[in-house]
Amino acid sequence: MSSRVVRALVADVDPIPKEIIQEFGLLHLHEAYIGIHQPKNAEEADLARKRLIFDEFFYLQLGRLFQMLEGLGSQMEKDGLLDKYSKPELNAVYVEDWSNLTKKFLKALPYSLTSSQLSASSQIIWDLKRPVPMNRLLQGDVGCGKTIVAFLACMEVIGSGYQAAFMVPTELLAIQHYEHLLNLLETMDEDQPKPSVALLTGSTPLKQSRIIRRDLQSGDISMVIGTHSLISENVEFSALRIAVVDEQQRFGVIQRGRFNSKLYHSAPSSLSASNTDTSSEGDFHMAPHVLAMSATPIPRTLALALYGDMSLTQITDLPPGRVPVETYIFEGNYDGFEDVYKMMRDELEAGGRVYLVYPVIEQSEQLPQLRAATADIEVISHRFQGYNCGLLHGKMKSDDKDEALKRFRSGVTRILLSTQVIEIGVDVPDASMMVVMNAERFGIAQLHQLRGRVGRGARKSKCLLVASTTRCLDRLKVLEKSSDGFYLANMDLLLRGPGDLLGKKQSGHLPEFPIARLEIDGNILQDAHAAALKVLGESHDLERFPALKAELKCKRPRIDIAPADLSELDPQIITVTFCRYWSPGLGKFVALYESGGWFPMITVKMGATIKQTNASSAKDETHLLSTEIAGFMDYPISRATIGTTRHRRAPYGSLPNDEDGVHGCSMRCP
Ligand SMILES: Nc1ncnc2c1ncn2[C@@H]1O[C@H](COP(=O)(O)OP(=O)(O)OP(=O)(O)O)[C@@H](O)[C@H]1O
């Protein structure tokens, strides 16, 4: 059968331009089809496979970039976008041209930025000065100093009179960042008005949170740090210009995207008096810039496949003076624990501070082999008399958690028994030892994160991983050998595949690749990305490559657009509702859009604002889903196609919640 099909193939079927085929050493598509079915030798089979994989990646990258270009107005913006992706190093604003506030903040830091931090900040500030919303992922190994880069970005927009929001996944982290920022602002020169900063979390008392919300709306507060409370509907900003999402892998695409509905409408606030900003009136209705930060390094291949529509910035160096954490693996038997306790005692006697990390808070009958934090505190206190022990876990009240961390930070407690609640972001530079109980319960990337809680100061630090059985020792050994998060992530990718590495939440957003395997085909993906940039660089709208354009169109989801009454549509405010199942019973729905792919693109009329609100006739579920679409609005928005749509499963990926392959996406006028 297959040989008959192969014989019937027309030779001239290749939509990819000849120059790309030559430059990237590809087989012609016809040869690839023959080669994959009837290879003459292994080399030909390999080349055929490479070509077919290239196509899988190429159309994905081309589709995303094409969508992004479509969303931009002028030729200059389009050139700018392609330039940004092809030569990111050229798009940087040097320190002299940062806003006065940012420069003063930089000057007040107790250290100099590393070269990676400086170049990341310069690239981000370049983006902030453009009238197109930034969508950037800042990656780096644990403890590399991403927070300060994000703070600088916030200062830049505040210095230009706008507001900044900084969202983190836990309260503990929110408090830590808040206090850190206040300390830094404290040391700044007095002659400059200082930004007012607020902390908003689920535990903020109602009265206080009302005041904060009022001041955010009026513009009296320039920056807010908090948990996902920041994206709740009742938080409104007067001029939100940047949303920083720390530890972005903890938030879904949906939550990140919610910032997009917090468009800014009003003129810049009081701090703009001293600004050097070049923003124009044209960005009046712009969605905020989004700076996502990821502490679990993701191999570049995966990042491209996952976030092909985001600019990527990596911090590749660590602050000077860091000594790599020494890692030791122990078996959790009697001798193993005696060795561990001995090392702990030595560390404490030498003035160090120790984290003990447990997989569970309380002992469980089902899993008696797991050591539990609360159950162990007596044992440890007894064993290490003379050293105060503290307890920290997710079930404690917010104030108690904060207090426990403060006591550890100040050295009142020298041993902190904790769960993985400390895994992300906790920064106690004097902590010098970490012991992880039942270490086999944690993934490699997670252990690397945990280990990153020590070795953050100049003191030499150690990490002791205690495994329950000998069987698990080998898997943990990779941590003994390497302290490079990118290397470990690559190992994880190779050993366990992208699904396990990313976890369910993130890997659900990976497109499907029938032939390619991300863990081994990363080079082809990079080539495909470069090829897509090249093609679009030569012809933004692909008019010069009609066969390619036609092919791309076939690869996008098919959409039937029903006619709708446009007369009532206010082009300034359009409400978007996303229904898993399209239902004509939901009232007068109009609109949505013409393309899809892995992320559907929402296109709205020039100058229009998408405001996401609750559709009045919608039930709860619809409302919930209505917020999901916001997650896809990471694009500059410029054009509208009005109608009601249904589309089939995207051939190169699927939409979240794509259970039956049929979606309805609707846009509704208010
Ligand atoms: N250039 C620098 N020189 C010296 N210390 C620095 C520098 N940059 C940051 N630091 C310090 O390094 C520590 C780690 O920084 P930060 O908390 O920003 O790391 P991070 O990248 O967010 O890491 P993690 O993901 O582990 O939380 C902090 O104590 C910070 O003050």
Image (cartoon, rainbow, N blue to C red):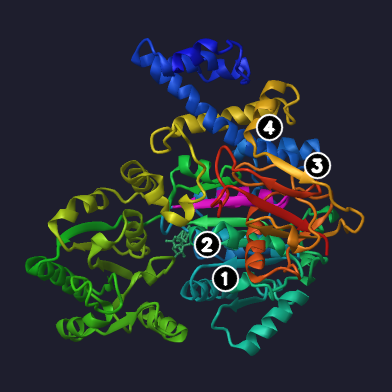
Give the position of the C terminus as an image quadrant: bottom right
Q: Is residue 554 left or right of residue 382?
A: right
Q: Are marks 4 and 2 in contact (CB under 8 Å)?
A: no
Label 1 C-beta lies within 8 Å of the nearest ligand 1 atom: no
**C-alpha separation, residue under disc 1 versus residue under disc 3:** 33 Å
Ligand 1, image quadrant it occupies: bottom left
- Pointer 3: what residue? 73
Residue that appears at 83% across and 47% down: 563
Q: Amino acid at mark 3?
A: Gly
- Pointer 2: what residue? 251
- Residue 450 at x, y = what percent? 34, 63
Could you tell me which secondary element the residue under label 1 belongs to?
helix
Q: Nearer the viewer, residue 650 or 282?
A: 650
- Residue 651 at x, y = what percent? 57, 37
Q: Are marks 2 and 1 in contact (CB under 8 Å)?
A: yes
Q: Which residues are magenta?
A: 120-140
Residue 553 marker: 4
The quadrant holding residue 270 is bottom right
Instruction: Please state the total of marks drawn on the protein image.
Output: 4
User: Can residue 668 be seen here?
Assistant: yes
**C-alpha separation, residue under disc 2 versus residue under disc 3:** 31 Å
Could you tell me which secondary element the residue under label 2 belongs to?
loop
Q: Earlier in the sequence, mark 2 or mark 3?
A: 3
Label 4 C-beta lies within 8 Å of the nearest ligand 1 atom: no
Residue 228 marker: 1
Residue that appears at 39% across and 18% down: 45
Above or below for 6 versus 121: above
Q: Amino acid at mark 1?
A: His
